[in-house]
Image (spheres, rainbow, N blue to C red):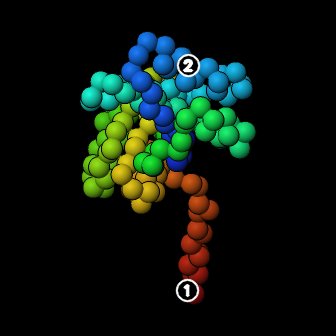
Amino acid sequence: MSITIKKAVLWRTEVSNKPGAMGASLAPLADQGINLDLVMGYTNPDKTLASIEVFPIGSAKAQREARKVGFSKAEFPCVVVQGKNQAGLGKKVASALGEAGINLNFFVAQAIDGEYVGLFSFEAQSEADLAVKVLRSALNNAPASKPSRKPRAKAIR
């Protein structure tokens, strides 16, 4: 199974919860040619503010532009899992994290045209680091290591 597992940095902003706020927040990023893989928006509990989270904001130029319009790096570490979708993949991922004692801050996933993308958030960087290791192992995606050759036993005559 070809699945990539990597750390991710979300960028977020809070805006007034009103029609057009998301479009206004994303417009300057789009105008600068910043291509986003993820846009997430939701209303905060008090209903007066909304949070907008985006990924990736990679280059120095993109980071400058994002800061100009009020985005900043989210404080919670994330991991992205991406690859060919298959039945039971979500259960396999959730079970592996749970068995390792890793609690999720939040999780969002989607499969389109046979491709799976999941974004996992954790409270601490140490949890995200462990999650990468656990998921690589669980999804048989551990970095390839050179197989060791066992010395041949010599026949005794």
Tell me, for residue 141, which label it has, or none: none
Q: Is residue 134 left or right of residue 58?
A: left
Badge 2 marks a residue whose secondary structure is helix
Residue drawn at x 31%, y 41% is 94
Q: Using the image as rendered, state which of residue 129 and residue 157 is in the foreground.
A: 129
Relative height, residue 114 to residue 100 (above, below): above
Q: Is residue 83 left or right of residue 130?
A: right
- Crowding around mark 1 (Cα neighbors within 10 Å: few <14, some 14 to 19, many 20+) is few
Measured Cα–Cα span from mark 2 to mark 1: 81 Å
Q: Quadrant of the C terminus?
A: bottom right
Badge 2 or badge 1: first in the primary sequence: 2
Badge 1 marks a residue whose secondary structure is loop
In the picture of the structure, the residue carrying the numbered disc 1 is 156
- As drawn, the residue found furthest toward the bottom would be 157
In the picture of the structure, the residue carrying the numbered disc 2 is 24
Query: Residue 154's spot in the image, x, y percent?
Result: 59, 81
Marks 2, 1: nearer the viewer: 2
- Residue 96, can we see it? no
Q: Amino acid at mark 1?
A: Ile
Q: Image quadrant of residue 2?
A: top right
Q: Using the image as rendered, state which of residue 13 and residue 110 is in the foreground.
A: 13
Residue drawn at x 26%, y 30% is 45
Query: Residue 1's spot in the image, x, y percent?
Result: 50, 37
Query: Residue 7's spot in the image, x, y percent?
Result: 52, 47
